[in-house]
């Protein structure tokens, strides 16, 4: 194996470990965002139920006031009816009482519907309150663990990355730059073995001339298709 390719292969092992540590580190905030989103949705569901109950309470109070006003008006019309001096006055009061009674009945029917909805929502609100409290406790515990894990992974990544420097000695800048570019663009695999005269990275067959160079280790050979550095195991 060519000495430079041998150094690049060793460097790739280090860089792969750094990349793996970075992926684990990146996964922590992603998981945090996922859990936070789930808790936010649950909290929003609870708040929606709570707000609906408040709306119902306000509407019921309004209906009670309106029903009270109608009942007062009915009493007045009943007085007019009972004290009517003629048939037309009596009939007008009676008709007015009928209309007011119908309005009152509609309001009371609406009030009953709202009370039933409120009673149905109360257990659901209680259930959601308990879920939010439990999930909040779990999430807060997770945040503490995530903070500790992030610190550990960051330390591990930096420690591995620091050891990279010792592998750079002897690698020409041109090959190092080429390696870095291939490592980034080819999914962290810049140096690959030759398998049955094929690049194991993209499975392109190499030329007999390149096969001979790899066998003797006399030159650096890159795959003509994917650009990866090749070596013969």
Image (cartoon, helix red, strand yellow):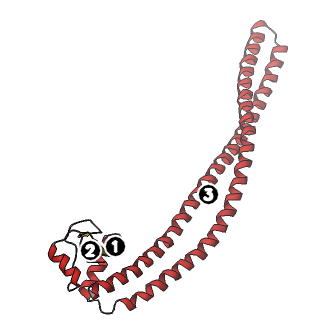
State the residue position of label 1: 189
Instruction: Please tell me whether the stretch drawn in magenta is mainly helix, strand or loop.
Output: loop
Task: Name the image quarter holding residue 81.
Answer: top right
**Residue 139 x %, y %:** 64, 64
**Residue 166 x %, y %:** 39, 91
State the residue position of label 3: 39
Residue at 71% across, 31% down:
113
Circle nearer the N terminus (3, 2): 3
Circle nearer the N terminus (3, 1): 3
State the residue position of label 2: 228
77 lies left or right of 223: right
Q: Nearer the viewer, mark 3 or mark 1?
A: 1
Please say whether residue 91 is visible from this viewpoint: yes
Judging depth in this view, the residue of 44 and 21 nearest the camera is 21
Q: How far apart are marks 3 and 2 (CA)?
A: 46 Å
Q: Distance between the residues labelled 3 and 1?
A: 39 Å
The answer to whether mark 2 and mark 1 are in CB contact below 8 A is yes
Q: Is 230 contained in the magenta span? A: yes
Q: Distance between the residues labelled 2 and 1?
A: 8 Å
Judging depth in this view, the residue of 213 and 81 nearest the camera is 213
224 lies left or right of 182: left
Mark 2: which secondary structure?
Answer: loop
Task: Name the image quarter holding residue 211.
Answer: bottom left
Task: Name the image quarter holding residue 224.
Answer: bottom left
Q: What stretch is highlighted in magenta?
A: 225-233
Q: Which of marks 3 and 2 is in front?
A: 2
């Amino acid at each position: 194996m060519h000495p430079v390719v041998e150094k690049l292969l060793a460097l790739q092992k280090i860089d792969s470990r750094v990349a793996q540590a970075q992926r684990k580190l990146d996964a922590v905030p992603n998981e945090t965002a996922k859990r936070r989103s789930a808790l936010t949705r649950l909290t929003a569901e609870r708040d929606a139920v709570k707000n609906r109950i408040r709306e119902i309470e306000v509407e019921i109070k309004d209906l009670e006031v309106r029903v009270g006003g109608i009942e007062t008006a009915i009493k007045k019309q009943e007085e007019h009816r009972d004290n009517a001096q003629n048939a037309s006055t009596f009939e007008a009061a009676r008709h007015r009482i009928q209309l007011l009674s119908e309005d009152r009945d509609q309001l009371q029917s609406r009030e009953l519907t709202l009370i039933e909805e409120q009673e149905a929502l109360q257990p659901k609100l209680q259930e959601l309150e308990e879920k939010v409290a439990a999930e909040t406790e779990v999430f807060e515990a997770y945040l503490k663990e995530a903070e500790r894990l992030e610190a550990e992974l960051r330390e591990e990544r930096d420690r591995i990355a620091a050891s990279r420097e010792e592998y750079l000695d002897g690698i020409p800048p041109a090959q190092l730059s080429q390696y870095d570019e291939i490592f980034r663009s080819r999914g962290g695999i810049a140096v690959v073995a030759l398998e049955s005269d094929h690049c194991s990275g993209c499975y392109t067959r190499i030329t007999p001339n390149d096969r001979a160079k790899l066998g003797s280790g006399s030159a650096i050979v890159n795959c003509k298709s994917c650009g990866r550095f090749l070596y013969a195991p």
